[in-house]
Image (cartoon, grey):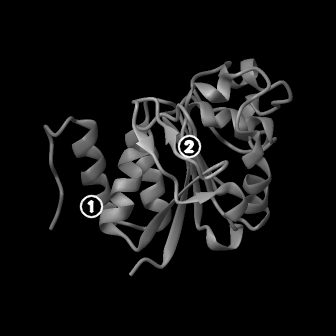
């Protein structure tokens, strides 16, 4: 039985590979249901050309019923003026309720524009990336040149850190014990050449 919910935001051009490992692991090995939504609830087409029909529209989403919000990257985040800003109020409501938010690649721009990265450790697509896209960003001294950073309920990752991103989401939901988690991550990061999964 699925008792918890990971909300996955979908939009035209979202980077479909970035949340893939995280949501597959949650679906297979945990009590976490994946709740997909878009701004309007209408189908979207991913960067890889997959047409996906979200389960809900943004106005139907409730912070109280969400245990983690997962926001994938995509070129839309880098558009002048910022795309998908409509989900900002949901993100802020989740944070007011101390609910976690996970953003990877370009989606970190949204968090930067909302001021959520100004005073906590975080990462993104390299030093200077957020400065170039977030006019009010003040978190330079908290930036960490790491694949993925989890701090105070906010998970951030660069666009090539899908495995590490999934690992932090697994940790949040306690999907695996520590030894199994380390084995899973090592298996994926080694391209399957090392497998230390424990029964």
Residue 104: image tag:
none
Which residue is tagged 2? Answer: 149
The residue under the point 30% across, 47% down is: 185
Report the residue that reaches farthest toward the right: 136
Q: In this view, does 177 lie above or below 76?
A: below
The residue under the point 31% across, 67% down is: 29
Closer-to-camera residue (112/171): 112
Residue 136 in view here: yes
**24 to the left or right of 12:** left
Sequence-first disc among 1 and 2: 2
Q: Is residue 54 above or below residue 64?
A: above
**161 to the left or right of 41:** left
Residue 180: image tag:
1
Q: Which picture quadrant has residue 58?
A: bottom right
Looking at the figure, which quarter contains the C terminus? Answer: bottom left
Report the residue that reaches farthest toward the front: 42
Q: Residues within 10 Å of mark 1 (few under 14, many from 20)?
A: some
Q: Do the residues labelled 1 and 2 touch (CB within 8 Å)?
A: no
Q: Residues within 10 Å of mark 2 (few under 14, many from 20)?
A: many
Q: Where is residue 145 in the image (x, y as percent from the top left)?
A: 56, 28
Q: Where is residue 41 in the image (x, y as percent from the top left)?
A: 60, 53
């Amino acid at each position: 039985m699925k008792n918890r919910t990971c909300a996955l935001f979908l939009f035209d051009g979202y980077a479909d590979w970035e949340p893939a490992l995280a949501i597959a692991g949650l679906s297979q090995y945990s009590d976490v249901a994946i709740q997909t939504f878009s701004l309007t609830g209408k189908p979207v087409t991913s960067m890889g050309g997959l047409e996906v029909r979200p389960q809900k529209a943004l106005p139907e989403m409730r912070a109280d019923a969400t245990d983690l919000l997962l926001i994938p990257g995509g070129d839309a985040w880098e558009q002048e003026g910022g795309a998908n800003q409509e989900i900002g109020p949901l993100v802020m409501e989740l944070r007011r309720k101390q609910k976690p938010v996970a953003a990877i690649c370009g989606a970190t721009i949204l968090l930067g524009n909302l001021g959520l990265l100004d005073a906590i450790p975080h990462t993104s697509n390299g030093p200077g990336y957020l400065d170039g896209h977030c006019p009010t960003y003040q978190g330079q001294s908290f930036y960490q040149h790491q694949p993925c950073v989890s701090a105070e309920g906010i998970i951030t990752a660069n666009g090539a850190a899908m495995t590490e991103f999934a690992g932090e989401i697994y940790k949040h939901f306690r999907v695996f014990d520590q030894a199994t988690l380390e084995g899973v991550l090592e298996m994926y990061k080694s391209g399957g050449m090392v497998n230390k999964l424990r029964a």
